[in-house]
Image (cartoon, grey):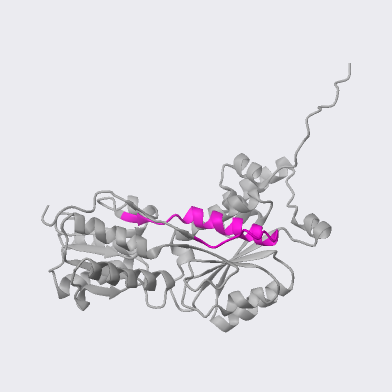
């Protein structure tokens, strides 16, 4: 007796199905299938899962039918000669994971790229890429101070742009985290624990997040009547090594502060490393607060109190906004997200 055909509709396999079968995230599966850097064993596992499920990316078919590619370009713009945070930091992974997941929900895929050039070159390159019709929309994560020209170059090609954490908001839509609110949370937490002498390790000059956080630190301490000597504020790269060296310089120059706020968790981890080497107890001798809440914050000794940036949500909101712009949704709007404080064990009262 012949079996009747299964009346249930069969949907085509999705990227999330491939990721689940391979045991990886959607972001990793996308990177593996698009030739981006992942471990070779991971790439092979993802490719085997795609073959088993007969997964085929449908952006080409969509382009033929609708004139759209189904692809959102995600560009991180870095300045030549600066620390490459996309290689040594987990900060961007959460943004990308959120973007990949949300993009697929809306029927798009993400093409991830890093640009390392000056402003004029980046603008020219992105304009050329947009002009070839490769993307339906572009997400730009500019790390450094800029005049918005490379976002404008893409928009001039008729391709909508979403910018991330750029206070100038040069895109059609913008998603950012309230840096000032984050610094306020950190300063208030230290003040609540009795600290009035707070040193600050700021990020590098010209970096958008670093500049915003430094301005917020001066504002927050001034509003609370705290005096911050110039020698207690130092600019550093967002690395463990830079944090360790800068904190050593602070200790050599003065020891009047009882707490340290770092503009980045890697910087804070480096400071804690130096403190241990100098025989200082964290938090009994110096309380430390970081910023971002990346993985290293849970791995320090003691675990680091830090300001959590909702970076997965940043990616989700950015991809959702990009998809809405492609659909010409008139309700799409810029978004400002709130950070939160994660209390761990690196803060106590002075001398506690």
Q: In the displayed structure, does residue 3 sit left or right of residue 274? A: right
User: Which residue appears at 64% of the width and 50% of the height?
Assistant: 104
Q: Is residue 35 visible?
A: no
Task: List x then y, in percent, for residue 30.
Answer: 63, 53
Residue occupying image coordinates x 48% and y 66% = 165
Q: Residue 36 in the image: x percent, y percent? A: 61, 60
The answer to whether residue 32 is left or right of residue 303 is: right
Tell me: residue 18, above or below residue 154: above
Where is residue 34? Give x, y as percent.
66, 58
Q: Which residues are magenta?
A: 306-335
Q: Quadrant of residue 112?
A: bottom right
At 72% from the left and 44% from the top, the residue drawn is 51
Quadrant (top left, top right, bottom left, bottom right) of the N terminus: top right
Residue sitting at the far top: 1
Res. 251 in view: yes
Q: Position of residue 227 (x, y in %)?
A: 18, 72
| View extreme (left): residue | 351
Is residue 181 highlighted in magenta? no
């Amino acid at each position: 007796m012949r079996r009747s055909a299964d009346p249930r509709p069969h949907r085509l396999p999705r990227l999330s199905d491939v990721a689940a079968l391979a045991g990886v995230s959607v972001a990793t599966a996308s990177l593996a299938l698009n030739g981006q850097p992942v471990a070779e064993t991971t790439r092979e596992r993802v490719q085997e899962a795609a073959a088993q499920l007969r997964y085929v990316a449908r952006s080409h078919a969509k382009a033929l039918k609708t004139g759209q590619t189904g692809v959102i370009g995600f560009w991180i713009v870095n300045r030549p000669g600066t620390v490459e945070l996309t290689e040594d930091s987990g900060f961007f992974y959460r943004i990308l994971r959120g973007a990949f997941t949300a993009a697929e929900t809306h029927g798009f895929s993400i093409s991830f790229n890093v640009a390392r050039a000056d402003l004029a070159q980046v603008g020219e390159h992105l304009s050329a890429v947009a002009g070839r019709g490769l993307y339906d929309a572009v997400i730009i994560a500019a790390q450094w101070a800029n005049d918005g020209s490379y976002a404008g170059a893409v928009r001039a090609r008729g391709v909508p742009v979403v910018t991330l954490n750029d206070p100038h908001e040069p895109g059609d839509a913008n998603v950012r985290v309230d840096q000032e609110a984050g610094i306020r949370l950190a300063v208030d937490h230290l003040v609540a624990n009795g600290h009035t002498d707070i040193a600050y390790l700021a990020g590098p000059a010209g970096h958008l997040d670093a500049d915003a956080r430094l301005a917020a630190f001066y504002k927050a301490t001034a509003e609370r009547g705290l005096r911050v000597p110039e020698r207690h504020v130092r600019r550093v790269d967002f690395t463990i090594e830079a944090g360790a060296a800068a904190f050593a310089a602070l200790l050599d120059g003065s020891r009047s502060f009882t707490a340290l706020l770092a503009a980045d968790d890697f910087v804070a981890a480096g400071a804690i490393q130096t403190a241990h080497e100098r025989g200082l107890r964290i938090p009994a001798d110096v309380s430390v607060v970081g910023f971002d809440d990346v993985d290293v914050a849970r791995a320090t000794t003691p675990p680091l109190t830090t300001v959590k940036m909702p970076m997965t949500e940043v990616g989700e909101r950015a991809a959702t906004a990009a998809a809405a712009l492609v659909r010409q949704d008139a309700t799409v709007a810029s978004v400002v997200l709130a950070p939160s404080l994660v209390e761990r064990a690196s803060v106590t009262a002075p001398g506690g």
